[in-house]
Amino acid sequence: MTTTPETLPAAPGDARAPGAVLPPLRIGPLTVTTPVVLAPMAGVTNAAFRRLCRESGAGLYVAEMVTSRALVERSPESFRIISFEPDEVPRSVQLYGVDPTTIGAAVRLLVEEDRADHVDLNFGCPVPKVTRRGGGAVLPWKRELFASIVRAAVDAARPYGVPVTVKMRKGIDDDHLTYVEAGLTAQDAGVASVALHGRTAADYYSGTADWDAIATLKEAVTDIPVLGNGDIWSAEDALAMVAHTGCDGVVVGRGCQGRPWLFADLAAAFAGSDERIRPGLGEVARVVRRHAELMVDHFGEESKALREMRKHMAWYLKGYVVGGETRAALGLVSSLAELDDRLAGLDLDQPYPGDAAEGPRGRAGSPKRPILPYGWLDSRELSEDFRRDLHEAELSVSGG
Ligand SMILES: Cc1cc2nc3c(=O)[nH]c(=O)nc-3n(C[C@H](O)[C@H](O)[C@H](O)COP(=O)(O)O)c2cc1C
């Protein structure tokens, strides 16, 4: 993952800035000059975190996934998830669902009430609470259901000019791969781009992402942009993925946890510059403080916001020398005043630690056999029982 791509020759009509590695990413009517997408991450990519990322770089920043049922039922939590700051353009929402009718209704709500400029569909989630209902990464196995969901979303969004995209994994496991077929189905259904996380549901977050699969998808899906996702920990990794796969843009998840400035590195890299942000601990502490303030604004409640900040704290401090006690204490703060107090106790002159702050971060672990609805693998078609109960299979609570 260390090679740097040659700048590809500009194709006719390619409005690429001089030196840029790739042309702008076109997602339907949206133009994303730096072809980088912040991966939707439940519990992470809320309006506060997206603001930090937006301030650092350029790209498309997707909100946490919201379940179509919760949205249609207008749960307060789902409306928090799809809340955007007034200056956030485009407003990118990710929807999860298993029932075409509910998905269609959710997309209609979003577009008719002018709540989104882009809708991404989640076919990548591997968590048991989702897969046991036939959702997320295991859904494209049911090819007609997948096509119906995508069509329902595209048809609802089309009159409003809102592009719909698909984000998926390779399939259920190595014996049940679905991504090429799903990519072609999505293209036929009128989606504006497809993104592939190079893992199966069974891989969960283990091992390394299969970038060859992204290259295979790029060869198969030729009419719309193909985005690559998985294991981009640095701007160099992003360039390497483009070189390896020929993808039209990259989707970055865990690599930016505790490192919203990665978007500055990515913007520089795609513009052909080798400038990189290498913050010392003092700068990191300032970003943590700002993140916490934005979280308080977002959640409207200091203790809730600081509770939500806890996981970010470990990510921000990765690689810096911070005593175990201080690290633990930072993970327990419940007010901004307490946070200030703890941050002031850090060695704020400490420089960027180099490799210790780089590389994998966030979720990892070993492969897991996906939990599936009864008889799911027996057929590519939906059983009558499952079809009848589709609405029941919808999750009403968001969060992945
Ligand atoms: C904490 C966390 C939450 C996630 N939530 C979502 C989600 O809501 N929707 C989704 O499509 N993927 C979700 N993902 C998967 C990421 O979008 C991404 O596909 C995956 O992490 C691989 O990319 P990465 O290697 O850059 O992290 C989540 C991942 C993590 C680590």
Image (cartoon, grey):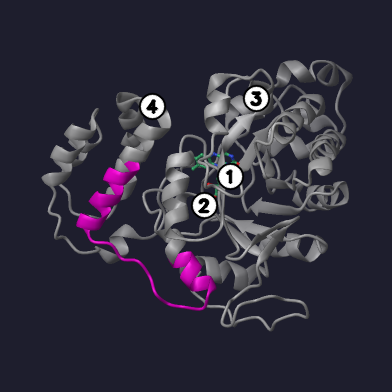
At mark 4, the secondary structure is loop
Q: Quadrant of the C terminus?
A: top right
Amino acid under disc 4: Gly
Dot 3 or dot 1, earlier in sequence: 3
Distance Cα–Cα, label 1 vs label 4: 37 Å
Secondary structure, mark 3, is helix
Q: Give the residue drawn at x 66%, y 35%.
A: 95
C-alpha span from label 2 to label 1? 7 Å
Mark 4 or mark 3, which has the lower sequence index? 3
**Mark toward the viewer: 4 or 3:** 4
- Report the front residue among 275 and 160: 160
Residue named by callout 4 = 300
Q: Amino acid at mark 1?
A: Asp
Marks 1 and 2: in contact by CB < 8 Å? yes
Camera-nearest residue between 114 and 71: 114
Classify mark 1 as within 8 Å of ligand 1 or not, answering yes or no.
no
Which residue shows up at 59% across the image and 60% down it? 250
Q: Is residue 213 visible?
A: no
Q: Is residue 292 above or below residue 356?
A: above
Query: Residue drawn at (49%, 67%), measured in percent from left and top?
Result: 267
Question: Residue 309: x and y, percent?
Answer: 33, 36
